[in-house]
Amino acid sequence: MIIAFIGLGNMGGGMAANLIKAGHEVRAFDLSAEATDRAQGNGCEIVPTAGEAVAGVDAVVSMLPNGKIVERVYSADVIGIAPTSSLLLDCSTIDVATARKVGEAATAGGYDMVDAPVSGGIGAAHSGTLTFMVGGTDAAFVKAEPILAAMGKAVIHAGASGAGQAAKICNNMLLGASMIATCETFKLAERLGLDLQTFYDIASKASGQNWSMTSYCPVPGVGPQSPADNEYQGGFAAALMLKDLRLAMEAAWNTNARVPMGEQAEEIYAALVASDGGTLDFSAVFKTL
Ligand code: NAD
């Protein structure tokens, strides 16, 4: 297949390289010369505009920073320019309303489109082990699955257009809240004089068990290897968690959903990002309590 790839940053760079490894021809565009140089080194053909990237392709994949940029790129450079036979796949994390709006514009233009945000960070993007949550029609999902499978370990149909983004922000709101709950629980255990490894051994076999503790423990030296053991470097940056929590709060506002734990999580991550710039891993909440 000939695939246009727009947005070759931390995530997109690795994803485009995996499409090449799977035997696709990738025409790539990014505003950053550093990103395009890296992509060229991985075998992508670099073109000077997004419009040139999408001309004559079988599919368009995008991995961009936010909803405004996704809307702008699709309306200016993709819809009406890519062949209507091409499948459009936006893998960026954006708000549900914009995902639906861009999906509707694509359908009106005669395209099949899916929103396909990912779970898994830069490491998973490079190793091709992302999980994709896909929103779109059954027909669009069937076409999208083999393309996404070349970049991930799981491809799940979440529902209609926008459902991929909805699943992504709901999952990350749960992750943010459960990480904070895990951090404060270990702080309390410490104040109560418990040995933290012993408490980990108990809680990981009791009803408090959760992914933030047993797969990504925020306490240095406790549980499996995690960013906490590397001074909270690497992993999933707190600023990206804050971005996803803000998308979740926007969605809650738009749907009248009560999410008090999500609101608290957003406040706590906003404070963490304000204090350290948001580059540390999201488990660094542990240090601030
Ligand atoms: P990034 O900033 O590293 O990459 C974004 C790229 O888009 C940059 O190279 C930028 O130059 C390019 N870009 C911006 N505007 C453009 C335009 N108009 N045309 C072409 N290129 C343009 O970001 P990232 O970490 O790769 O994240 C991309 C998306 O993936 C975001 O929506 C993010 O929320 C999501 N995500 C990131 C992670 C992660 O761990 N980094 C994990 C899951 C999801």
Image: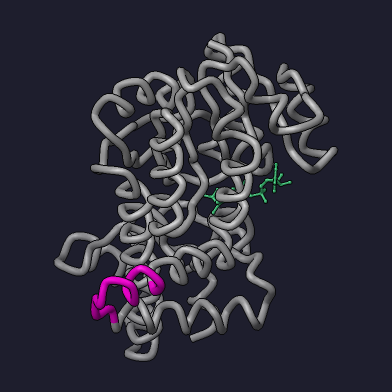
Q: Is residue 225 left or right of residue 6?
A: left
For residue 249, above or below residue 87:
below
Seen in the picture, residue 40 relative to 217 is either above or below; the reply is above
Q: Residue placed farthest to the left in the image?
A: 207
Way the structure is coloured: one colour
Q: Is residue 201 visible?
A: yes
Residue drawn 44% across and 69% down? Answer: 245
**Is 62 in the magenta?**
no
Q: Is residue 251 magenta?
A: yes
The front one of 105 and 227 is 105
Q: Position of residue 225 (x, y in %)?
A: 48, 52
Residue shown at 59% from the left, 57% from the top: 68
Write down the quadrant of residue 53 in the picture. top right
Q: Please provide percent x and percent y for residue 160.
A: 26, 43
Please identify the residue farthest to the bottom as the structure is shown.
191
Q: Determine whether, in the image, residue 76 is placed left or right of residue 59.
A: right
| Residue 280 in the image, given as x and y percentages of width and height | 62, 66
Magenta part of the chain: 249-259
Residue 203, compared with residue 256, is above or below; it is above
Count of picture labels: 0
Residue 12: percent from the left, percent from the top? 61, 37
Q: Which of 93 and 256 lies nearest the eye of the viewer?
A: 256
Residue 220 visible in rendering: no
Instruction: Give the residue displayed 74% in from the left and 38% down from the top.
Output: 30
Majority secondary structure of magenta residues: helix
Dividing the picture into quadrants, the one containing residue 183 is bottom left
Q: Residue at x 41, y 42 (%)?
A: 115
Going by the image, does 250 lie left or right of 79?
left
Name the image quarter holding residue 276.
bottom right
